[in-house]
Every structure is written in C-alpha cells, then in structure tokens.
C-alpha cells in the first residue's frame, strides 16, 4: 500500500527509517588501502552466539541495529552456522573491532548482511580496508550480484561510503519497527541523536 505524500505519524515506541538498497553487478577496483593498515580479518567458522551478540552490539548499538537482538538462539545459530554464511571479525591489536557478514544463501548472490566497525575505528580507514576485503571475498565466488542495505538510522556517512565503494542505489523503502530502547534490547542511552517517543 503506497504511503500518501506528506507527513505520516509514527506511533510512540516505534522508529521510522528510510532504507536504501544498493548493489554491485560486477567487481569494482578497490579503493587504495590506508597505510599503514594495522587491521586483520579473522574468519569465525562457527561463531559463538555470545561473542557475536557482543560484537554486534558494540558495532551497531549507536545505530540501533536490532534485527539480530530479536532472534532466539536457534534462529540466530541457523543463520550464523549455515555453511553459506561467512562471518569475520576485524581485529585490531588482538581486539575485535569490526563485523563483516557475507550471506551467499541465494544462488549467485551475496548479501553484505552486516558491516561496521566500533566507534573508535570510525574515520581511520578501517571501514575502507574491511570493505576492500569484503569485495574480494564476495567476488571470489561465482556471483552476479553483491548487495547491501543501509538506513537513515545508520552512520550519516554510510550511504556515501557504500557509493564510493562501488555500490549503486537501486531501491528505497520505509521501515517502521519497534524501538529497541523501548523494548529493553538496547540501553535507553543508545543513539542519543534519535529521540525516544
């Protein structure tokens, strides 16, 4: 059902966001890696759920990532332990400071399911370095499409970052969902730039 032009009320306890889907239909040349590059990418073959949720929260809490917080153990393990899903940690001096998740479950397609770094790594080139690895890993398999979505709750530079990385916008949607702070899935202090109603 199409939304009418103009303003639409969002009920208290809900979030509304504009979601943009972007795609890459062929491998692009990587952007130059920052130098020096103090990062390493470590594959997590069967990630522990507590480890994953901790890193997911540390990377996504300020941007109100919530989808994986709403999953029970069985549902989350079914995704993370699927052989067609690849999970990686960005390691900085032995600390996990970034999350990269590639989902190959659809034939000839790779979804960049989750991608982000912790606050301390924003702006220092870690994201660009990790994106170069993501593009390499995705196109190392026989795919025809590599895609990602971002939204207006995400870092303000996320959409431009994906475009600079070679993704092209192809779809825009409105998502309305329960505010994870209201549900207790995220602290009420998370994402202070987005008011709780």
Image (cartoon, helix red, strand yellow):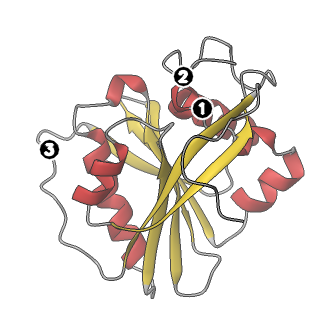
129, 171: nearer the viewer: 171
Q: Quadrant of residue 75?
A: bottom right
Residue at image x 52%, y 80%? Answer: 109
Residue at image x 48%, y 19%? Answer: 193
**Marked residue nearer the N-terminal end (1 or 3):** 3
Question: For the residues carrying marks 1 and 2, which lies nearer the camera in this image?
Answer: 2
2 and 3 marks in contact (CB < 8 Å): no
Residue 64's label in the rendered image is 1
Residue at image x 45%, y 88%? Answer: 142
Per the image, label 1 sits on a secondary structure element best described as loop
1 and 2 marks in contact (CB < 8 Å): yes
From the viewer's perspective, is 74 left or right of 36?
A: right
Residue 74: x %, y % from top left? 88, 52
Question: For the residues carrying marks 2 and 3, which lies nearer the camera in this image?
Answer: 2
Per the image, label 2 sits on a secondary structure element best described as loop
Residue 34's label in the rendered image is 3
Residue 5: x %, y % from top left? 55, 53
163, 79: nearer the viewer: 163
């Amino acid at each position: 059902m199409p939304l009418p032009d103009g303003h639409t009320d969002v009920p208290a306890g809900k979030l509304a966001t504009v979601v943009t889907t972007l795609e890459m239909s062929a491998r692009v040349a990587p952007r130059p890696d920052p130098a020096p590059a103090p990062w390493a990418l470590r594959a997590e073959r069967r990630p522990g759920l507590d480890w994953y949720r901790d890193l997911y929260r540390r990377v996504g809490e300020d941007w109100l990532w919530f989808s994986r917080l709403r999953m029970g153990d069985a549902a989350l393990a079914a995704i993370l332990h699927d052989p067609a899903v690849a999970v990686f940690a960005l390691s900085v001096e032995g600390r996990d400071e970034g999350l990269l998740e590639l989902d190959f479950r659809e034939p000839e397609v790779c979804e960049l399911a989750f991608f982000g770094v912790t606050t301390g790594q924003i702006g220092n080139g870690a994201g660009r370095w990790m994106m170069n690895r993501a593009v390499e890993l995705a196109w190392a398999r026989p795919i025809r499409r590599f895609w990602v979505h971002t939204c207006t709750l995400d870092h303000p530079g996320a959409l431009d970052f994906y475009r600079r990385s070679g993704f092209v916008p192809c779809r825009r949607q409105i998502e309305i969902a329960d505010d994870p702070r209201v549900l207790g899935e995220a602290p009420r202090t998370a994402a202070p730039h987005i008011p709780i109603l």
